[in-house]
Image (cartoon, grey):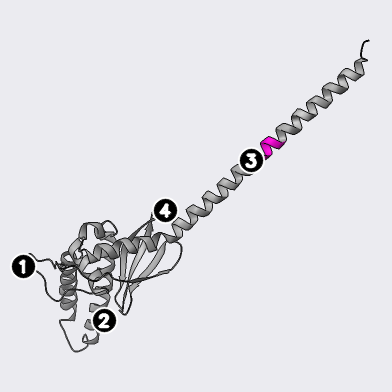
């Protein structure tokens, strides 16, 4: 007994719809899983990026304790730090000179000499050993004495591991200070999760 043509078409359409629905179910499940994994990965990456300055300071704290200037140097943008210190020290020097300018005819010469001295002092101080010493002290400041080689030296003895407070000042900038000290170290994001010291707050 032959089936009517419309019955064959009916079964074909039903089969096609069944296969299509099954495919949609499988594809939809896979897409939902892919979306879930993507969302989870995004959360993990965002968390890692947000925690990165704290992880950086943990690494720096360990390096400070072990007097590891090489590791500390990896987290310092030396040209940027030098320019920042030169600018801040020149402002201080200019303010002092302006106070005595009315009674000192050589104030202009003094400002030129101050600029030269600041440049030389900063160039000699902002080195791996100098930055390590600042971090050991826990606050940004210039050295009172230097070694016979013209550069300050960090302590050769293991020091206490410092505890740093980290405060975000925008997504790519953090302010770091050691507990119980004045002044602060300014770090900027370098890439996604790396941070480098670029400036200091001398106050």
The reply to whether dot 1 and dot 2 touch (C-beta < 8 Å) is no
Residue 26 on the magenta segment = yes
The reply to whether dot 3 and dot 1 touch (C-beta < 8 Å) is no
Residue 202 position in % (x across, y down): 29, 76
Q: Which residue is mark 1?
A: 148
Magenta residues? 25-29
How far, Cα to Cα, is label 1 from label 4? 40 Å
Local crowd at mark 2 within 10 Å, few (<14), some, or many (≥20)? Answer: few
Foreground label between 3 and 2: 3
Q: Which comes before the other along the chain, label 3 or label 2?
A: 3
Local crowd at mark 3 within 10 Å, few (<14), some, or many (≥20)? Answer: few
In the picture as drawn, the residue positioned furthest to the left comes out as: 148
Q: Which residue is mark 4?
A: 192
In the picture as drawn, the residue positioned furthest to the top comes out as: 1
Q: Which residue is mark 3?
A: 31
Local crowd at mark 1 within 10 Å, few (<14), some, or many (≥20)? Answer: few
């Amino acid at each position: 007994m032959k089936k009517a043509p419309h019955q064959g078409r009916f079964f074909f359409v039903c089969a096609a719809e069944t296969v299509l629905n099954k495919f949609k179910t499988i594809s939809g499940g896979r897409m939902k899983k892919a979306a879930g994994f993507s969302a989870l990965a995004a959360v993990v990456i965002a968390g890692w990026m947000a925690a990165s300055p704290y992880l950086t300071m943990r690494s720096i704290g360990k390096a400070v304790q072990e007097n590891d200037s090489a590791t500390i140097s990896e987290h310092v943008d030396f040209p940027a730090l030098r320019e920042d210190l030169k600018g801040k020290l020149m402002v201080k020097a200019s303010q002092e000179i302006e106070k005595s300018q009315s009674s000192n005819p050589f104030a202009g010469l003094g400002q030129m000499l101050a600029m030269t001295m600041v440049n030389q002092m900063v160039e000699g101080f902002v080195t791996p050993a100098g930055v390590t010493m600042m971090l050991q002290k826990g606050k940004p400041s210039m050295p009172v004495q230097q070694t016979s080689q013209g550069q300050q030296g960090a302590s050769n003895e293991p020091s206490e591991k410092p505890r740093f407070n980290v405060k975000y000042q925008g997504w790519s900038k953090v302010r770091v200070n050691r507990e119980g000290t004045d002044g602060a170290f300014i770090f900027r994001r370098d890439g996604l999760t790396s941070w480098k010291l670029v400036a200091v707050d001398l106050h």
